[in-house]
Structures are given as C-alpha cells and as structure tokens.
Amino acid sequence: MASSELLSELADLVLAVERPHPVRVVIDGPSAAGKTTLADELAVVLGERTDREVIRVGLDYFKKDPALRTAYPIESPESYYYDTWDLDAILSKLLLPLGPGGDRRFVSGMRPTHARTALAAAIETAAVDAVLVVDGCFSMRPELVDHWDLRIYLHVDFDVVLRRGTERDQAWMESAAAAAERYRTRYIPGERLYVDQVVPQSLADVVVDHTDFDHPVLRQGRS
C-alpha cells in the first residue's frame, strides 16, 4: 500500500493537468515495482477527490496472443520487450480515442493477462473531463510516449525486481527457483533493453523511487 502522502501528491499533480479531452495518466516501471497497486490506489484517491469519471486500465490486458509472437523466440528478452504488447490496439482502442480529436469511445482490454483468448471488449464512452489511470511496463516506448498527458515512472533497481518478482511469482510457477530463472533470463534482460534504449526516467514528468514501499521518494521534473 502506498503512503497517503504520496497518493495525495500524485492526485494533486493529476488534477492539475488540464486538457480538452480525458487526461491520460500512466504509471510505468519494471516488473514488481508496484505499478498496479499504486495505480489502483491512485484511482481510488482520485475518485474521492473529484466528481470526474476515473477510468482504470492495465496494459497487460492489451497483450498479443502468444501464438502471434513470432518475431523472436517466445521466451527471449527480445520477445518480451518488442513483441508481447499489442501497440496498435493500445493506440487505436484506448489512447487515440481519448486524446485530441478522439471520439472518446474506448475499450479497457482486449485479452485476459495470459492473452490466449479474447475478451468480449465492450465499447465504453468516456466523459470529456474523465481521468484515465493506466499501469504497464514499457509504456513510454516511442510508439506510446507522446500519447500520455502525465507520465509517472517507478524506479526500482533490478536486484530488487529479482527479489520481489521471485517472491510474487513463485505462487503460480512451479518453484521460487523457476520464477527467479524467468526473471534472470527473460524479464530483467528485456527491461534492461527498454531502460537502455528509451531511458524512461528522462521522459517521465514524475519519478518515484519505490525501493521501499513504505518510504517512497517522489521527484518531479524530467532528469
């Protein structure tokens, strides 16, 4: 759970953004940085602070069917970074409709997180002053970065990613060792590709050091 002080400061920053269309907020960062939890909690706080519609979406619901990820070996870091998310769907079904000149008709997801089946993606219409809160890895990559109105990046060192990710994912994998191996060989190398190529901290409007969930350090401004 994020601190109430951090959530209050982030909510202030979100509500200060003015656009003639829904405000599109993203929380980016490596695996196990706390993106989903923070986005969930921020959406709740925003709902308490404003009468505006708050829309909560996770980019993990916009992954490609694994059968279509053919550009690289499926377990490789390159497949994870370059070929896992359906960028065309993220843009056409979510970010462009809610952006300048959009019709505000969007879908909140295309597939469940395992991505092997399709969701019945109902089309919704956002209020013109809605706030969209999104979390997802790699969300400041070049194809997406200009379509956010507020960009938040959670910084966590990769040794912390390995520890947290192993603790979290061993519950659904066969063992902690298997989870750690997946992080060492796929997730962390793929996320290093992103960090090295894109330098997302330099693109963020707000950077939060999330090494200690109980004592996050918030830094505004691009570095």
Image: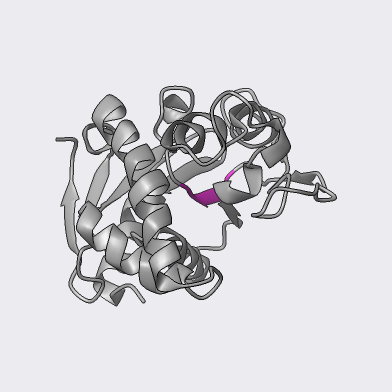
Q: Does 70 appear above or below 77? A: above
Q: Does 23 appear above or below 101? A: below
User: Foreground residue, 11 or 174?
Assistant: 174
Quadrant of image for the N terminus: bottom left
**Count of numbered tags:** 0
Q: Residue at image x 41%, y 72%? A: 176
- The type of colouring in the image is one colour
Q: Main secondary structure of the magenta part?
A: strand
User: Foreground residue, 63 or 22?
Assistant: 63
**x then y, percent, for residue 47:** 52, 67
Quadrant of image for the C terminus: top left
Q: Residue at image x 43%, y 63%? A: 179
- Compared across the picture, whether 197 is left or right of 117 comes to left
User: Foreground residue, 44 or 129?
Assistant: 44
**x then y, percent, for residue 82:** 49, 29
- Compared across the picture, whether 116 is left or right of 52 comes to right
Residue 217 drawn in magenta: no
Q: Residue at image x 75%, y 48%? A: 116
Q: Which quadrant of the structure image shows residue 202?
A: top left
Q: Residue at image x 56%, y 46%? A: 59
**x then y, percent, for residue 186:** 41, 45
User: What's the magenta region?
Assistant: 129-136
**x then y, percent, for residue 30:** 35, 50
Q: Is residue 28 visible?
A: no
Q: Does 214 appear above or below 196? A: below
Q: Is residue 196 visible?
A: yes
